[in-house]
Image (cartoon, grey):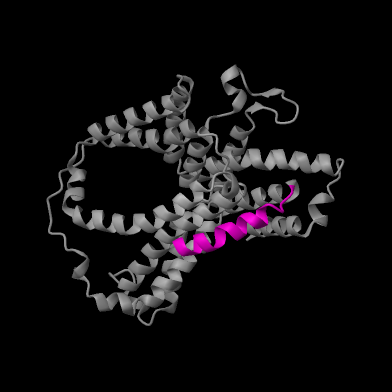
Amino acid sequence: SAVLLVVTAIPLSELALRFGPGEYFALAVVGLSLVSALSEGSALKGALAMGLGLALATVGLDTQTGVPRFAYSVEFFDGFPLVPVLLGLYALSEVLFMLEEGPAQKIKSQKINGILAVPLGTYWKLRGHLVRSSLLGYVIGVIPGAGASIASFMSYIVAQKTSKEPEKFGKGSYEGLVASETANNAAVSGAMAPLLALGIPGSATTAVLIGALMIQGIQPGPLLFTRNPEIPYSIFASLFIGVPVMVFIGLAGARLWGQVANIPRPAIAAIVATICLIGAYASENSMFPVYIATAFGVIGYVLRKARIPLAPIVLALVLGELMESNFRRAMVISHGGYDIFYTHPLTLIFLIVAVLAFVV
């Protein structure tokens, strides 16, 4: 999947340079349609979460007129800051769940075998699953909002359908394990492709990376390869270096990592909350992001209690501004006519895909 990212990211960015406002608007609509349709659980709840994210994206100064929208103080003129929102929704909401669950029970230490517990010949027998799941995971990872979970489930189902021993699935089958975990990891590289080439996050995790780059004044997208080539190429290198390092550290410290579960849950909650609030403050060196992170921590907790997915909110918050600004630019170019959206072939194809995603 890392090789696929290196091979496809630059051609994808070159294609993106030909995009006009209409194409970018349609691409954002595709992303949002897939986010709501592919969310885990209820599609209705996924759409609801997407709607909430779009509503949050309207806060701030109007991109064309400069008129404040739902901005009750100067701090809101730039809209909701992405990093504090992410810290609140994901990390601080988890802290609240930790506090609710109370102290965890102590786990007895068990014998953990290394990678050689599985004969090396077994990996060769599973080469077909490894290759197919890598390709499937990468392709699904490229789709905004699909994510590693959907890649994992899809790959598992395909492996079960093509297996000669489908009855072993769910009972410790190596085929199911390899298919699921390979796709799960391959989706990480896939989610990087739209981030680097188009400036669109493929997952909630890459949305965090967009926020980090923008804090440094770096705009992800097709021009990233010419203006800041050290960023994408460093990411490419880190993927190749990171995997063997991750495997080594994971296996070498397996017994130690197992003991992390015995750290008192309130202590972990306190450490995580402290790091999050310091991170929120550091993003703008003011208390405003801290208040935002805290508020979204509570919102994230309530939404998770209601089983409403958080990823569509984050992706809609990022894609909402892209969609609105390009829609309005397209309308200016076409002098108020909607023909720009169906006379350009690529724009029309994207919009048809979006409609099909909603319908299916």
- Does 86 sit left or right of 77 as displayed? left
- Residue at the image position 64 percent from the left and 53 percent from the top: 30
**Image height of 95 relative to 315, above or below:** above
Q: Main secondary structure of the magenta part?
A: helix
**Image height of 65 relative to 346, above or below:** above
In front: 158, or 302?
A: 158
Q: Quadrant of the C terminus?
A: bottom right
Residue 90: x, y in percent? 42, 38
Indicate whether residue 17 is drawn in magenta: yes
**Image height of 156 relative to 99, above or below:** below
- Does 23 sit left or right of 70 as displayed? right
In front: 242, or 257?
A: 242
Asked whether residue 111 appears in the rendered view, the answer is: yes
Residue most extreme to the bottom:
164
Q: Quadrant of the N terminus?
A: bottom left
- Residue at the image position 62 percent from the left and 54 percent from the top: 13
Residue 223: x, y in percent? 62, 47
Asked whether residue 358 appears in the rendered view, the answer is: no
**Image height of 187 relative to 119, above or below:** above
User: Where is residue 349, by image quadrant?
Assistant: bottom right
The magenta segment is 1-20
Indicate whether residue 248 is drawn in magenta: no
